[in-house]
Image (cartoon, grey):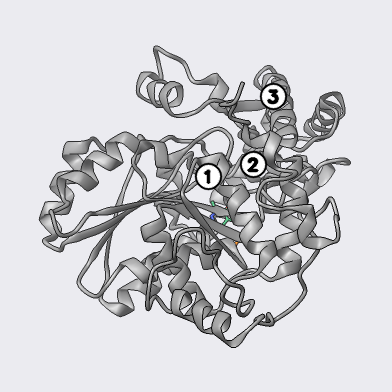
């Protein structure tokens, strides 16, 4: 059977590394070095010709190692492995998710351009797009999950600036609202011209690399905070961008000059994390389904935002996107506790196993309060319009036993004040 194609999870232990490179070591070592010795001056010259784009690589010629800001084996092997999940041609790893995002934006936007983006965005992305980019003459426009293709086209046309990029985060954090990536591509195509393709970048952090593949829907970039599911152990900050060879060459070019690549140690940690990515995420998603069901039936929980609960009739538009674009409901959910902030805080303050912390996608379950924590910077009216309420708790489900998580939530929910008391408290706050 000569044509068997291995699945990504089967290749995470070996792809792109050969033991003969390192004394037979089964595992890729940490290449903790800043610079690489050239075997001869001629080969050093050849490496630089390729690195500086003076000529294309000759057939069979490997990209020569020069200096760890340009390339390093731990990063290159990691990038090759990350490509497999998204079926991407190339990948670049960064020292953080924010540096991955900002490098893409800076490389492909110029003064006068319009950037269209979904909302809500991760706080860091939101700040960079709405407060930093305008200083360089870049215009921004936001769209919502209930906007149609026609609505968006009209809004873009009204702005009268050339659309250069669509930047999307789906599912939206923390409500799990979904954006239709095929529709976003159609908008981008509508405003593309033969000499300028409108690019589409998707921050795929919230769903992670297994269950949504933005490139398949016409995105040019699938971007990750590797701090989340990819790293998966809350012990490393890193980011990644996947895309075509041609575009990634530009991303890597700017990365070389900003110097925001990940270091070898981060690269090595992520190589180790990738070996268990599939098994971690599948387990997290299975557990999340159990936890979501428990929460839905709890009398003190008013609503649960979990993709597995989308209704084909009452949520027809969202359900349709979910069925087309996702292969799992994921491991992120949000729920509303009765009693507003006091109710949510009672849950957060009384959990014994789940940690009260931001971040997500890790082996340990993490819970936080979007209204006053991750989304504290979002304007109040906008926040409420997005469905982020004072009683909302966001939960990132880890790999603990589901029975233990349910026990923990149950005993914490038991500490939520009864409805009458909570209403009184809310009135006090409002007054
Ligand atoms: C965490 C996160 C980021 C930023 O990543 P860092 O690694 O913290 O820089 C960007 N986007 C999303 C959706 C995130 O959750």
- Residue at x 47% of width, y 57% of height: 378
Which residue position is annotated with label 3? Answer: 295
- Residue at x 56% of width, y 57% of height: 240
N-terminal of the pair, mark 2 or mark 3, is: 3
Would residue 171 be found to the left or right of residue 22 on screen? left
| Label 1 SS | loop
What number is the disc on residue 173? 1
Would residue 282 be found to the left or right of residue 249 on screen? right
The percent coordinates of residue 122 (x first, y second) are 51, 55
Figure label count: 3
* Quadrant position of the N terminus in the picture: top right
The percent coordinates of residue 186 (x first, y second) are 23, 39
3D distance between C-alphas at marks 1 and 2: 9 Å
Labels 1 & 2 near each other (Cβ < 8 A): yes
Q: Nearer the viewer, mark 1 or mark 3?
A: 1
Would residue 27 be found to the left or right of residue 38 on screen? right
Looking at the image, residue 58 lies above or below residue 169:
below
Which residue position is annotated with label 2? Answer: 394
3D distance between C-alphas at marks 1 and 3: 19 Å
Q: Nearer the viewer, mark 1 or mark 2?
A: 1
- Give the quarter the ligand 1 occupies: bottom right
N-terminal of the pair, mark 1 or mark 2, is: 1
N-terminal of the pair, mark 1 or mark 3, is: 1
- Residue at x 56% of width, y 40% of height: 85
């Amino acid at each position: 059977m000569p044509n068997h194609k291995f699945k990504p999870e089967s290749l995470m232990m070996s792809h792109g590394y050969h033991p003969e490179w390192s004394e037979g070591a089964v595992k890729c070592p940490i290449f903790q070095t800043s610079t690489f010795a050239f075997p001869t001056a001629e080969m050093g010259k050849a490496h630089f010709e390729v690195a500086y784009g003076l000529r294309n690589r000759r057939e069979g010629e490997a990209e020569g190692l020069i200096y760890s800001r340009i390339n390093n084996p731990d990063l290159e092997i990691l990038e090759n492995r990350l490509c497999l999940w998204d079926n991407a041609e190339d990948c670049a790893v960064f020292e953080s998710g924010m540096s991955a995002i900002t490098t893409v934006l800076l490389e492909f936007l110029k003064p006068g351009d319009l950037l269209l983006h979904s909302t809500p965005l991760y706080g860091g992305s939101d700040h960079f797009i709405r407060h930093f980019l305008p200083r360089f003459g870049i215009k921004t426009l936001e769209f919502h999950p209930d906007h149609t293709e026609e609505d968006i086209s009209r809004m873009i046309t009204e702005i009268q600036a050339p659309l250069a990029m669509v930047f999307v985060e789906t599912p939206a954090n923390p409500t799990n609202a979904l954006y239709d990536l095929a529709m976003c591509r159609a908008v981008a195509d509508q405003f593309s011209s033969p000499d300028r393709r409108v690019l589409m970048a998707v921050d795929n952090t919230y769903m992670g690399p297994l269950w949504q593949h933005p490139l398949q829907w016409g995105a040019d970039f699938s971007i990750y905070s590797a701090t989340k599911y990819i790293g998966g152990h809350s012990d490393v900050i890193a980011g990644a961008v996947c895309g075509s060879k041609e575009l990634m060459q530009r991303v890597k070019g700017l990365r070389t000059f900003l110097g925001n690549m990940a270091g070898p140690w981060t690269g090595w940690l992520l190589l180790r994390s990738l070996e268990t990515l599939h098994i971690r995420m599948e387990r997290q998603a299975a557990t999340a389904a159990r936890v979501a069901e428990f929460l839905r039936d709890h009398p003190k929980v008013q609503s649960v935002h979990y993709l597995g609960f989308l209704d084909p009739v009452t949520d027809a538009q969202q359900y349709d996107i979910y069925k087309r674009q996702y292969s799992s409901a994921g491991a992120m959910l949000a729920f509303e506790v009765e009693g507003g902030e006091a109710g949510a805080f009672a849950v957060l303050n009384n959990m014994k196993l789940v940690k009260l912390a931001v971040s997500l996608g890790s082996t340990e379950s993490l819970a936080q309060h979007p209204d006053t924590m991750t989304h504290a910077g979002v304007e109040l009216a906008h926040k409420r319009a997005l469905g982020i309420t004072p009683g909302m708790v966001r939960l990132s489900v880890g790999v603990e036993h589901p029975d233990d998580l349910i026990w923990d939530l149950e005993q914490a929910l038991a500490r939520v004040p009864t409805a009458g008391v909570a209403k009184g408290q809310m009135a006090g706050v409002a007054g």
